[in-house]
Image (spheres, helix red, strand yellow):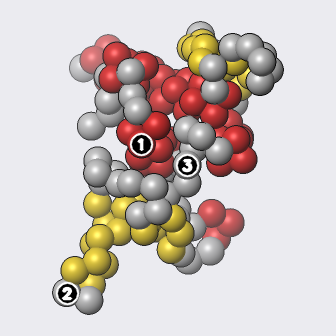
Amino acid sequence: MLPTRNEILNATNQQLNSWVAEYVMELRNVHHADGKEYMGRFDFAEQGDLIYDNGDEGTAFIHSYLPNYAEDISAAWKVAEKMPFFQLTGNSATIWYARVNKDRVSDKSAPRAICIVALLAVLNCERIGAMDEKEVL
């Protein structure tokens, strides 16, 4: 289940990494037990946990490690690339502002701002979809 707006705004970097991996990048966690791999949620994923990639560019599922989206700008840019109409302003000596559509956040860290606005955009898309379903019913 998606985190709430308040949970997103107050999340630790580890929580942001896990939620971005699952809800924005659509990656899945892999648990190893009894010689078998089990896909699951990122609720307790930590930096370096083994995950399945989503198989971009037609490749088979591959193993990789949970990227540090909330601290590594190169990982955060991969998140930004998934968002249409994304904007980032500011610089390393000031506050960073990230924006997608009507969602706008500020943070001292550009990667955190990117992660937060991406999650808020997903959350708002879910809300719009839920409102559309109610209107259809």
Residue type at mark 1 is Gln
Q: Nearer the N terminus, badge 3 or badge 2? A: 2
Cα distance, mark 2 to mark 1?
A: 27 Å
**x then y, percent, for residue 66:** 49, 58
> For this view, does 53 lie left or right of residue 136?
right
Query: Where does the N terminus fall, quadrant-wise?
Result: top left
Residue 20 in view in this figure: yes
Asked which secondary structure carries label 3, the reply is loop
Disc sitting over residue 34 in the figure: 2
Cα distance, mark 3 to mark 1?
A: 8 Å
Q: Residue at image x 32%, y 29%?
A: 3
Q: Nearer the viewer, mark 2 or mark 1?
A: 1
Q: Nearer the N terminus, badge 3 or badge 1? A: 1
> Which residue occupies the foreground of this view, 82 or 21?
21
Q: Nearer the N terminus, badge 2 or badge 1? A: 1
The residue lying furthest to the left in this view is: 34
Q: Which residue is mark 1?
A: 14
> For this view, does 81 lie left or right of residue 8?
right
Q: Are marks 3 and 1 in contact (CB under 8 Å)?
A: no
Q: Which residue is mark 3?
A: 68
Q: Nearer the viewer, mark 3 or mark 2?
A: 3
Q: Residue at image x 27%, y 84%?
A: 36
Residue 77: image quadrant is: top right
